[in-house]
């Protein structure tokens, strides 16, 4: 069976969260390049998952706006990552989900053999209604799967083998220690990347500790959750969906092929035919490239794949635009290493991912006046990456950095407002003046 | 490693609800093992707990990401864990009152102020921890850097007073809400995704006027977060315009005039020095 792809759900949730209810059903479906019928079906499925996973229980009317409302960031009540339920979307037959749950609950009681577990399944109270009479082979293959994903473990000893839950993390720790673990997982999942596994672990720890009921979306049950994280790009976990596949491909030096929708195009999933040459299907481009690095940009909370393509050299893709990713052939180690060192050299001076010509940007930053603490300096030191303060002046200091192109650093410089004056290159200085003139014109008519 | 495992399926999870079954995959353990390598782990656990965890995870392989993953434009990571996090997070969950000795910006120290802790807040921008709490004596909602806290001891306060302090925090938070409407300049609609990503860290709703092709983002934030909102607006430059919000509009005008003033002054200086040279 083909690997289940969650492209549609990911694109769907991303658009829902980012645009926060801006579109009605028709507009939404049009932008995703799907029919309104598919739109309705997808939202039904996502809602079912969300409510079963603990978030959201909305009425069926106005699915779009209500659901968007439920997923809206509500800072003081949002200890649980709202989008995590996406990772619970893998389809499963009802009988299979029932069987896996029975097996896990039975193993949670005590270690058991495959035959004993078969008995558990066949004697389950509602086994008959659900036609749940698995054969031994099915149980064995379930056990193999559970062992493979590391949820259970074979107990050492003679045949017939017994299996036990691999739950030492909670069994061997005291309540106090578990609390520390829970806090640590919370802090790390929220402050580090990647984070999806951390959020899943946090959720599992929480469920097993009995405080299982995840607080309702938009509810006020924030009591007891001690931590808040300010200015968090919480939708980033949607892009982590592709991350592990790409990291795996890099590890194995494999090319990937995918259908790419540049985030600048109007449609982001699969769309109508605009070009008669391509018959129908989509407006995305099929791409093939050798992934070398994945980049997380903290400035916008976005992910990129940096890759090599035999025709064009270094290529950059935004993870949010990548769909239908497939692993392809592997390349020789020497070739990969060569491309990797080439790329590493080219991005050494990238503020983000620009591989353009390197220039030295020289900037004067002004101290805030009066007795205020010098937050301008603090911020430059904190965010200025590899740049250096090269000169101190009366009431100001000079900062210098070598970067590839000036495009990517410009927003950061501009964010300092009048505390920053670009000295060089002259071109950037002129551009900043032009931008400030235009910005002034936006507000002068007050 | 695929984060879409069938074991994570929502039906399996909801069927196991209330059974107390703890299910953890090797993916999660690999992630945890990677995180335990971070210096924060030492502040987060007692030494013997850390050893125990490492022993439990000894057969797992740590998530191999660091080599292939680069983080860009990240603030320097000064502090992920603070030694006070462990005790303070417990006090918050237990809803007890505290007596705090702390210093403020100008260096002056406040001794033994009784208060009720509300949340621990981490600023992803400043990479620092803050305690949000209610100062009973001053009747004030406070945000104090953990680094500025000199000592914390549990204080005696009737549960109903603790409760009152917490509801007063809720009231204050809702009263200090500010809002603004940011309009995307239609010529930059192609960059909508970038703009929405940049604002995704705020509480917001978006309106779309299809006829005019105009997107308007309504942001809600606390009034003391205005400076950060402003820096975001300046960050995005001419792509957006503050449509509603007099304070922000006024500040944007001031910023742009002052910035232009800086460049004009410099131009005059340049002209002067050229004049001297010739």
Image (tube, helix red, strand yellow):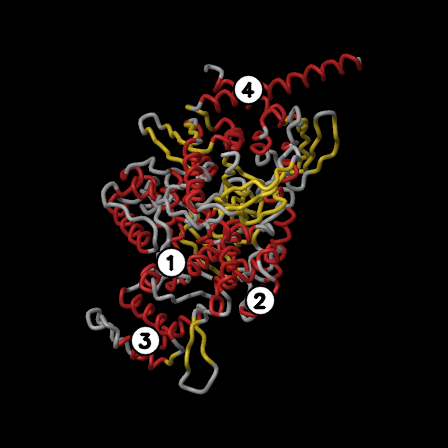
Picture layout, residue A388 above or below residue B24: above
Q: Residues within 10 Å of mark 3 (few under 14, many from 20)?
A: some
Left/right placement of residue A225 relative to residue A30 reads right
| Sequence-first tag of 2 and 4 | 2
What residue is disc 3 on? A138
Query: How far apart are labels 2 and 4 at the CA level?
Result: 55 Å
Foreground label between 3 and 2: 2
The answer to whether residue A373 is left or right of residue B33 is right
- Residue density around tag 4, few if under 14, some if 14–19, many if 20 or more, within 10 Å: some
Q: Which residue is mark 2?
A: B54
Query: Distance of mark 1 from mark 2, alpha carbons?
Result: 26 Å
How packed mark 1 is, by other alpha carbons closer than 10 Å (few <14, some 14-19, many 20 or more), is some
Taking the image as shown, residue B74 lies to the left or right of residue B277, namely left
Residue receiving disc 4: B254
* Alpha-carbon span between mark 4 and mark 1: 51 Å
Mark 3 and mark 2, same subunit? no
């Amino acid at each position: 069976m083909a690997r289940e792809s969650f492209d549609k759900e990911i694109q769907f949730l991303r658009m829902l969260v980012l645009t926060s209810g801006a579109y009605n059903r028709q507009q939404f479906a049009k932008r995703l390049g799907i029919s309104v019928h598919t739109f309705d079906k997808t939202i039904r499925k996502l809602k079912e998952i969300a409510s079963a996973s603990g978030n959201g229980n909305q009425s069926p009317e106005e699915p779009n706006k209500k659901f968007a409302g439920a997923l809206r960031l509500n800072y003081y009540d949002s200890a649980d990552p709202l989008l995590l339920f996406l990772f619970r979307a893998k389809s499963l037959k009802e009988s299979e989900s029932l069987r896996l749950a029975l097996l896990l609950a039975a193993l949670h009681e005590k270690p058991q053999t495959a035959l004993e577990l078969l008995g558990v399944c066949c004697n389950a109270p509602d086994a008959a209604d659900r036609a749940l009479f698995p054969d031994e082979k099915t149980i064995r293959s379930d056990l193999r799967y559970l062992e493979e994903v590391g949820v259970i473990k074979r107990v050492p000893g003679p045949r017939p083998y017994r299996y036990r839950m691999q739950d030492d993390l909670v069994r061997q720790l005291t309540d106090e220690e578990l609390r520390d673990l829970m806090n640590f997982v919370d802090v790390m999942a929220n402050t580090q990347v990647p984070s999806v596994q951390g959020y899943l672990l946090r959720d599992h720890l929480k469920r097993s500790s009995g405080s299982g009921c995840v607080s309702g979306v938009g509810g006020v049950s924030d009591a007891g959750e001690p931590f808040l994280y300010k200015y968090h790009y919480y939708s980033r976990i949607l892009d982590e969906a592709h991350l592990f596949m790409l990291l795996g491909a890099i590890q194995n030096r494999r090319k990937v092929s995918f259908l790419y929708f540049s985030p600048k195009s109007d449609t982001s999933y699969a769309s109508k035919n605009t070009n008669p040459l391509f018959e129908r299907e989509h407006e995305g481009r099929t791409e093939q490239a050798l992934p070398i690095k994945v980049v997380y940009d903290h400035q916008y909370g976005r992910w990129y794949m940096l890759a090599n393509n035999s025709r064009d050299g270094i290529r950059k893709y935004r993870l949010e635009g990548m769909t239908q990713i497939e692993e392809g052939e592997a390349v020789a180690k020497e070739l990969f290493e060569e491309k990797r060192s080439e790329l590493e050299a080219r991005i050494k001076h990238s503020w983000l991912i620009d591989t353009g010509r390197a220039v030295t940007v020289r900037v004067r930053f002004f101290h805030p006046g009066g007795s205020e603490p010098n937050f301008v300096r603090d911020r430059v030191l904190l965010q200025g990456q590899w740049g250096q303060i090269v000169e101190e002046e009366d009431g100001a200091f000079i900062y210098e950095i070598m970067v590839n192109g000036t495009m990517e650093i410009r927003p950061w410089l501009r964010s300092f407002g009048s505390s920053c004056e670009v000295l060089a290159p002259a071109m950037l200085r002129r551009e900043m003046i032009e931008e400030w003139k235009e910005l002034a014109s936006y507000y002068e008519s007050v | 490693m695929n984060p879409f495992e069938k074991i994570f399926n929502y039906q399996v999870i909801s069927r196991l609800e209330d059974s107390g079954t703890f299910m953890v995959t090797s993916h999660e353990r690999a992630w945890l093992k990677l995180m335990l390598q971070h210096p924060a782990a030492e502040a987060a656990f007692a030494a013997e707990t850390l050893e125990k965890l490492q022993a439990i995870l000894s057969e797992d392989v740590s998530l191999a990401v660091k080599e292939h993953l680069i983080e860009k434009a990240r603030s320097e990571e000064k502090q992920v864990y603070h030694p006070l996090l462990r005790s303070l997070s417990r006090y918050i969950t237990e809803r007890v009152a505290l007596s705090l000795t702390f210093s403020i910006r100008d260096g002056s120290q406040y001794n033994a102020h009784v208060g009720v802790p509300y949340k621990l807040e981490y600023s992803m921008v400043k990479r620092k921890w803050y305690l949000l709490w209610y100062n009973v004596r001053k009747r004030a909602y406070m945000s104090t850097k953990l680094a500025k806290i000199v000592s914390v001891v549990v204080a005696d306060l009737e549960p109903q007073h603790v409760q009152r302090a917490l509801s007063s925090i809720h009231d204050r938070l809702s009263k200090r809400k500010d809002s603004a409407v940011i309009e995307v300049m239609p010529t930059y609609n192609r960059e909508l995704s970038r703009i929405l990503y940049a604002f995704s860290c705020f509480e917001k709703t978006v309106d779309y006027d299809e006829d005019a092709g105009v997107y308007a983002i309504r942001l809600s934030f606390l009034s003391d977060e205005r400076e950060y909102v402003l820096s975001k607006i300046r960050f995005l430059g001419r792509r957006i315009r503050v449509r509603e919000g007099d304070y922000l509009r006024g500040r944007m005008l001031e910023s742009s005039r002052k910035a232009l003033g800086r460049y004009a002054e410099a131009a005059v200086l340049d002209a002067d020095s050229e004049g001297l040279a010739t």
